[in-house]
Image (spheres, helix red, strand yellow):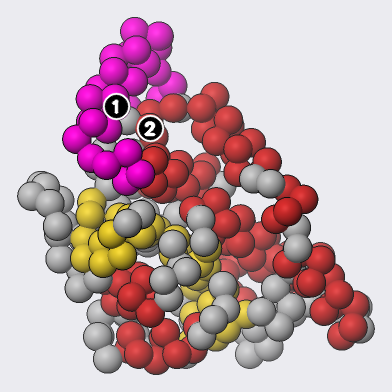
Amino acid sequence: MTTMPLTNPQLIEALAESRRTSHQVDPAEWAMRVELAACYRLVAHFRMTDWVYNHISAAIPGSPDHYLINPFGLLYEEVSASNLVKVDVAGNLVDDVPYDVNPAAFVIHGAIHQARPDAVCVLHTHTAAGVAVSAQAEGLLPLSQHALRFHDRVAYHGFEGIALDLDEQRRLVQDLGSKKVLILRNHGLLTVGKTVGDAFKEMFFLERACQIQVAALAGNRTMTLPPPEVCEHTASQFDNDASFLQGRDWRALLRLLDRIDPSYKE
């Protein structure tokens, strides 16, 4: 699969093949595959990947025990709707496909999908800024409007080593609780959403908040922090922005992908 923009003949053939593939799965599952593949491409576009070592997963509509995830070994810009793999909450491949799944994906993503039916999408990153903030004792500070989006809405999970131990699942889920954002100490960031677009938006602005925090602290200056009541007021404003935005931001990002390389739909 090419990661370069497709020529018109290539695009015609790719879309035709996409349609053929989409007929082999339930339409709701195919729509989720396209959304999730778009999320992978966007995470790559905004430089939040860690080679092949992270994951984004999405529950399959009408199939609560199954979710979609990237096959182990593909870069995010190589992920498309048709090569996402279907696994159960125990991490077993559901379909007979020539791919593997990283065991760490099951420990983190399988546990959250099983414990949180509202967590349709689970997104995890290892960015430099995210890991840096995860290692700071204070965690995410209310230094910016971006950070205030998450005021008192961030959970923390202590580092226990590479996420391969099943025993960690219970503690991870317990630490996340009902929140949408989890900072894994000395490890990275995690967001969940009722839609793929929601999970991506939370991660994008969490990442930006971490970048701002790292930059601000590097200035070695006294920080100005808003009072607690302003922090909570701002966070509550963000809580209510969905009715105002009505998905305009996610649709704009999909248009960006369509201009760059629409092969995520294949």
Tag on residue 263? none
Tag on residue 18? 1
Label 1, residues with CA under 10 Å away: few <14, some 14-19, many ≥20:
some
Q: What percent of the width, then of the height, locates residue 112? A: 39, 75
Check contact, mark 1 vs mark 2: CB within 8 A: yes
Looking at marks 1 and 2 on the same chain, the residue that comes earlier in the sequence is marked by 1
Above-or-below relation of 38 to 70: above
Magenta span of residues = 1-29
> Which residue is pictured at 62% across the width and 80% down the height?
154
Q: What percent of the width, then of the height, locates residue 79? A: 33, 42
Q: What percent of the width, then of the height, locates residue 96? A: 8, 50
> Which residue is pictured at 28% across the width and 59% down the height?
63
Quarter of the figure that contains the C terminus: top left
Quarter of the figure that contains the N terminus: top left
Q: Residue furthest front?
A: 62
**Going by the image, does 133 lie left or right of 172?**
right
Disc 2 designates what residue? 265
Q: Amino acid at mark 1?
A: Ser
Whether residue 69 is visible, yes or no, is: no
Q: What percent of the width, then of the height, locates residue 136? A: 62, 84
Q: Residue furthest top?
A: 9
> Which residue is pictured at 44% across the width and 60% down the height?
121
Whether residue 51 is visible, yes or no, is: yes
Above-or-below relation of 173 to 23: below
> In terms of secondary structure, where does tag 2 sit?
helix
> In the image, is residue 14 part of the stretch drawn in magenta?
yes
Q: Amino acid at mark 2?
A: Lys
Frontmost residue, 151 versus 35: 35
Which corner quadrant of the image does residue 30 belong to? top left
Q: Main secondary structure of the magenta part?
A: helix
